[in-house]
Image (tube, helix red, strand yellow):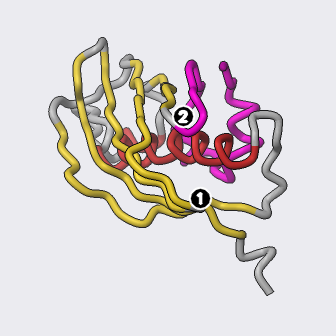
Amino acid sequence: MLFDVQKIREILPHRYPLLLVDRIIAMSPNESIEGYKNITINEEIFNGHFPTQPIYPGVYIIEGMAQTGGVLAFVSMFGEDTQNSGDKIVYFMSIDRAKFRNPVAPGDKLVYKLEVLKQKGGIWVLQGYAYVDEKLVAEAELKAMVVDSARTQK
């Protein structure tokens, strides 16, 4: 199952500069997902992190994993042909056991791989890994929930 950035934008509410996944390259609903982001020197964050030695921030790696997991949760709950009309949003609940193993720099292809640990109703617990050239650069356990967006809650 391949999703390009346009399809990802139909599911996630994130936009530039905080849409941190470019493509979904594999997905088994309710089980696992794989996506990636191409890291370029044109990323706005490199203006300040760090100008003389650009390093992609760890919190952005975690957020990219979370967004990839959000695509998995949304598609698992509502189907791959469903478009998010803005009535649902995936909220982060917790980040546990986050570890950063190696720095990520411009030119790297950052691959996110997540698997479902638990799912009950709209609550998802995912184990996430991030790789560059098949080398583990970060990992974390992420918990999120799919809820009605504030626009639809009255």
Please provide percent x and percent y for residue 44.
47, 41
Is disc 1 placed on a helix, strand or loop?
strand
Please provide percent x and percent y for residue 34.
49, 26
Q: Amino acid at mark 1?
A: Val
Residue 47 seen from this side: no
Q: Residue at 32%, 37% (x, y): give it.
A: 56
**5 left or right, relative to 139:** right
Q: Residue at 41%, 30% (x, y): give it.
A: 112
Is disc 2 placed on a helix, strand or loop?
loop
Label 1 with label 2: CB-CB less than 8 Å: no
Decide: is 121 above or below 45: below
Q: Residue at 54%, 34% (x, y): give it.
A: 21
Task: Compare marks 1 and 2 and give the one earlier in the sequence.
Answer: 2
Q: Which residues are magenta?
A: 1-30
Determine the residue located farthest toward the bottom in the rendered image.
154
Magenta-colored stretch includes residue 57 = no
Comparing marks 1 and 2, which lies closer to the viewer? 1
Please provide percent x and percent y for residue 126.
40, 46
Between 131 and 79, which is closer to the camera in this rendering?
79
Determine the residue located farthest toward the top in the rendered image.
133
Residue 66 seen from this side: yes
Marks 1 and 2, how far apart at CA: 15 Å
In the rendered image, which quarter contains the C terminus?
A: bottom right
Residue 128 numbered tag: none
Decide: is 77 above or below 30: below
Residue 90 numbered tag: 1
Within the image, what quadrant is residue 75 found in? top right
**18 left or right, relative to 109:** right
Decide: is 143 above or below 28: below
- Judging by the rendered image, the residue that carries numbered circle 2 is 21
Q: Amino acid at mark 2?
A: Val
